[in-house]
Image (cartoon, rainbow, N blue to C red):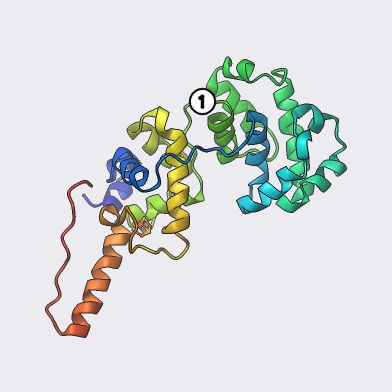
Amino acid sequence: MSPRAARGAGADAAAIAPSPAALYARLYKRYGNLRWWPAKSPYEVMVGAVLTQNTAWRNVEKAVARFADRLSPQFVEAAREADLAEIIRPAGFFNQKAAYLKTLTAWFARYAYSVSAVQAAPLPKLRAELLALRGIGKETADSILLYAFEFPVFVIDAYTLRLLSRLTASAVPFRYDEAQAFFAAGLDASLYNNAHAVIVANAKDHCRAKPSCAGCPLADMCGTGRAADVKGVERYSRRRGTPRKKPEYGSDH
Ligand code: SF4
């Protein structure tokens, strides 16, 4: 059954090839251990997860740098929201994000700003609490749970959804929960941290808005990459006047 047919028939994402483990192995070979999340403390991860919404990471770095050595939940709790907004201005949507940071910090206060206290709570309860906060969607909540508190939660973002659609050459957009279940079912939880990081790295190097499939480590296991390759061979064949020939691919998909 084709990936498209499998999805249309209501099969879950695990029914579509390649496997998450095969994907990760390829990406790890290219990008290695990227040691995410780039932050000095779990609280800085929480702040970064909010600030990165709808903006580039370099703007988050600029905003975080403006805290200097003051970035702590105690500082954010005590700061006036307007002052906080001014500090995080480079991250964009700064008034909204200041309010979100206040709310998120108030949630952390329920656990006495203790990472171990959060880690002692049940994951479903924490996720539900985070998702109930203003400005915290699934991607932000899961980023906080994985990267700040080391819970086994796979983070899905727009890059991951785009990658899955292209791998399966599916016209049906993947949903967050569907994509998350796909990775959770096929990847060891200890790899979730780096797996998300290498997917993002490949999205920046190759799987951009306009994909650059030549040299992509996933090209031979990707429906879109294979189609691009076939088109390239056909263009080459037409130029040369040689018979059209489909390229052969590896067996790890
Ligand atoms: S082969 Fe192309 S479409 Fe497929 S993952 Fe790589 S860059 Fe994206």
Image coordinates for residue 11, horizontal then vertical, percent? 31, 41
Please identify the quarter of the rendering in which residue 129 is found: top right
Q: Nearer the viewer, residue 52 or 139?
A: 52
Q: Residues within 10 Å of mark 1 (few under 14, many from 20)?
A: some
Q: Residue at x 55, y 34 (%)?
A: 142
Please name the amino acid that badge 1 sits on.
Phe
Image coordinates for residue 46, horizontal then vertical, percent? 65, 34
Q: Residue furthest front?
A: 69
Please identify the quarter of the rendering in which residue 28 is found: top left
Image coordinates for residue 160, horizontal then vertical, percent? 45, 48
- Secondary structure of residue under mark 1: loop
Q: Residue at x 57, y 19 (%)?
A: 119
Residue designated by label 1: 151
Question: Going by the image, does 245 lie left or right of 24?
Answer: left
Residue 69, placed above or below residue 119: below
Residue 40 visible (yes or no): yes
Q: Quadrant of ligand 1?
A: bottom left
Residue 137, placed above or below residue 3: above
Q: Residue at x 58, y 21 (%)?
A: 125
Q: Residue at x 40, y 33 (%)?
A: 191
